[in-house]
Amino acid sequence: YKFGLGIGANSSISPFARLQVGSINQAGFTEYGGGLFNLAVAAQTTTSVRTTFGVDLAGGFEVGGTLLDLGFRLGWMHEFADTARPMTAAFAAAPTSQFTVFGATPQRDSAVVGFSAATAISDRASLFVSYDGEIGGGTDNHALRAGFRITW
């Protein structure tokens, strides 16, 4: 829900909450071509249950006679599921001697940040740029987008 702030054109603050559940299933497989060193990897399932709480701030401001729409996002993301990312394997020549390797472990808590700017350059064309990031101690995700939009 948007709450008007009364500063600038269409300025608002919007609180948000999100629940995201994801599950990845990996089938088991066995390598070939390496002789005794072929790996047999067990089937695995990894599940993620994340919540995000935060606010979006938005507003339009006149800059040199042109309306510049700005947006800012700030939030907190929390992972409820197990953050370990194990992979169990064995050498095909010795299938009973399994070992487990752990991949990159995502942080349980991270910050969600975002910024966007857009302006119309004509009635049917506009420019935009945006950044979205999840920042949390080593397993960060960043996305930067820029573009030119035409409608007809």
Image (tube, rainbow, N blue to C red):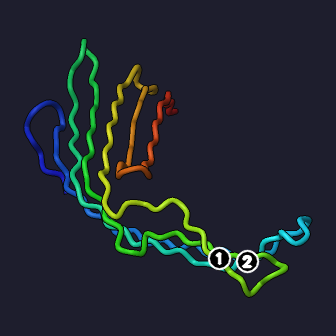
Q: Which mark is residue 90?
A: 2
Place of residue 51 in the rendered image (x, y in percent of width and height, measured from the top left): 32, 67
**Taking 122 as reference, is 37 left or right?**
right
Above/below status of 27 relative to 105? below
Whether 43 is drawn above or below 11: the answer is: below
Which residue in the protein does label 1 denote?
99
Q: Residue at x 24, y 60 (%)?
A: 53
Compared to residue 86, the image places residue 145 above or below, namely: above
- Badge 2 element: strand
Q: Quadrant of residue 122?
A: top left
Q: In the picture, residue 52 is in which quadrant? A: bottom left
Identify residue type, mark 2: Ala
Within 10 Å of disc 2 (Cα), the crowding (few <14, some 14-19, many 20+) is some
Percent x, y of residue 69: 28, 31
**Alpha-carbon distance for marks 2 and 1?**
6 Å
Secondary-structure class at tag 1: strand
Name the residue nearer the viewer: 120 or 52: 52
Q: What residue is drawn where x is 27% and y is 45%?
A: 73
Residue 117, image x and y in percent? 33, 31
Label 1 crowd bin: few (<14), some (14–19), many (20+), radius 10 Å: few
Q: Total marks drawn?
A: 2
What residue lies at 9% left-to-right and 33% top-to-bottom?
A: 7
Most foreground residue, 24 or 109: 109
Amino acid carrying label 1: it is Phe
Is residue 8 placed above or below 78 in the rendered structure? Answer: above
Image quadrant in which you'd find residue 42 = bottom right
In this rendering, position of residue 11 left or right of residue 75: left
Question: Mark 1 or mark 2, which is nearer the start of the sequence?
Answer: 2
Residue located farthest toward the bottom when viewing the structure as drawn: 96
User: Furthest residue to the top?
Assistant: 64
Q: Are marks 2 and 1 in contact (CB under 8 Å)?
A: yes
